[in-house]
Amino acid sequence: MMMLVVIMSLAVFACKGLVQALPFPAPNFNNCNNYQGCCPVPYNGTISEKLYVFDRKLPLRTRPAAHLLDDAYIAKYQRAYRLLRALPDSDPRSWKNQAKLHCAYCNAAFNFDVLTSSGRNSTMRFEVHFGWMFLPWHRFFLYFHERILAKLLGDDDTFALPFWNWDNQSPDPPLANAIPLAFANPMYDKKVQSSLYDERRSRCTKWPNLVDLQNALECANQTLELQTTLRQWNNRLMYTQLVTAAPISRLFFGESYKLGSAPGRGAGTLEVSPHGNVHLWTGNPNATIPFSDMGILQYAALDPIFYAHHANIDRLWEVWKSLPGGNRKDLSQADYLNTQFLFYDENAALVKVQISQALNINNFRYNYEGVPNSWIHEGSDAASAPCFPASTSEINEMILNTPPLSTKNFTTFANSSITFRVRRPVEKQLHRQEVLVIRSLKLEGPNGPALNAFLYFPTANLTTPITCIEFFGKTGGFGVVFGFDLPDSKMEWRLALGYKLQSLGMDQFSHVVVTLVQLGLPQIIQLKNAQIVYFDE
Ligand code: C2O
């Protein structure tokens, strides 16, 4: 297979002078770089060339909301992780080996030989995060995790992974957006330490503190007043990242990633935040390895809450597809659909899957318990007010007074905010999405810098709440602490404009004025070349 890929790519190179671009074949588990100790257990069996076949006779299982579990389900859930933790290290399905598998798919363990544009062979690391593989890879990972737990329980037909419904801001007990009690309380089942507990968690996660989807690095004393604000901010973050910032597939799923392209070219809106924020909020900033377990890709899957967190991410993928407005459907490029991965199944056999199999959730025979997605309304633009109201002439003046960003050199931005204008193309491209692209964004500060973006709001600063109607996107918050040590971590940040401008009724101006605000202590951030482009999907 690898041979074939190289030969085909030579042909591509010869006629176009480009780096090869083909879907990734499955990695070779027996050819793994163990520098972070992540290599999966080598496989001695033969891997079938055929794709994994789902069990069509499996009864439909409903993944329950973790905060609504009854005692019997919690007991079963805890037993599943006790059994998993008890498997020996030689078993590829063991708790540690599953965490390693997650790490292997994210930290340079698998290398692919590719041909570069200068015609040389080069070895490139592989990474399932920060791009379009993120959602389907994790759907498969969770599915096999769930099948392994079900098998250990001897409950193939009914066991389904609970999801941690942190996007649900309802103040009524039981709280959905605090860490579920069975995870939080080490002695939840009174006799032995809960198998769902992990001691490497932030003090912020102390029950009943609420998840902070906005500012993951600190937790002030959560007074009732602060909790009310947090709920509003969380709703607003959810709405922005899933509705106005992701009206089309490319923005939601992230940038393409094919054999020969650099990893980490740009994560989708769901992956960046809320996903990344929940990881960072949960991990312990004061641990020996700061932010472990959950805040470090290498260790994240050692915390059982990882799987409940990702079940919610997986559910939100389905929610996004059901939202009105925009063009919200799965990606359809062949290089995406044909990307392959390997996983150990519940019988410890290594099986091959491909992304095309992940898109229809019915293949997996699970669905999700219905919960309110109240952020769709409570965090909406319709429920927000302008914080910087300006007339048409005031906005035209604002445009005149705001400089553009240099397209040649990096602009270093070490203050808490930066404002620049970007010219909008003269002709309206109907039916295509207007997107602001900020190229070569270096978000590499020591504390994982994060940015909020505001439209026509030049005085926005650190204290500006995202509940302002002008808020239109967020990025960062992972950086170095999230294991993002890719050789070339200049990313693109793509911010949907068309959908937002229309919903604000502000579609008539020649330029947009954009203000980026750093969260937390200002760090050195570099960026250049902000442009408006049109995306087809
Ligand atoms: Cu593979 Cu939530 O990360």
Image (spheres, rainbow, N blue to C red):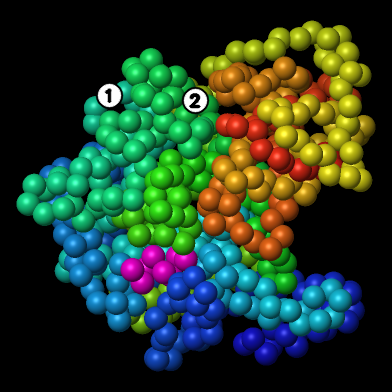
Give the labeled residue for mark 2. Answer: 233
Specify the farthest residue to the left.
191
Residue ID at (89%, 35%): 425
Q: Give how far across and how far down residue 447 sits, in percent.
A: 57, 43
Going by the numbered disc 2, the residue's amino acid type is Trp
Left or right of 402? Residue 522 is left
Q: Is residue 494 at least partly visible in the picture?
A: no
Going by the numbered disc 1, the residue's amino acid type is Asp
The secondary element bearing badge 2 is classed as helix
Q: Is mark 2 within 8 Å of ligand 1?
A: no
Looking at the rendering, the stretch of residues picked out in magenta corresponds to 96-103
Q: Are marks 2 and 1 in contact (CB under 8 Å)?
A: no
Give the labeled residue for mark 1. Answer: 172
Q: Quadrant of residue 22?
A: bottom right
Please identify, in this view, whether the residue under mark 2 or under mark 1 is nearer the observer.
2
Residue ID at (49%, 41%): 277
Q: Nearer the viewer, residue 136 or 173?
A: 173
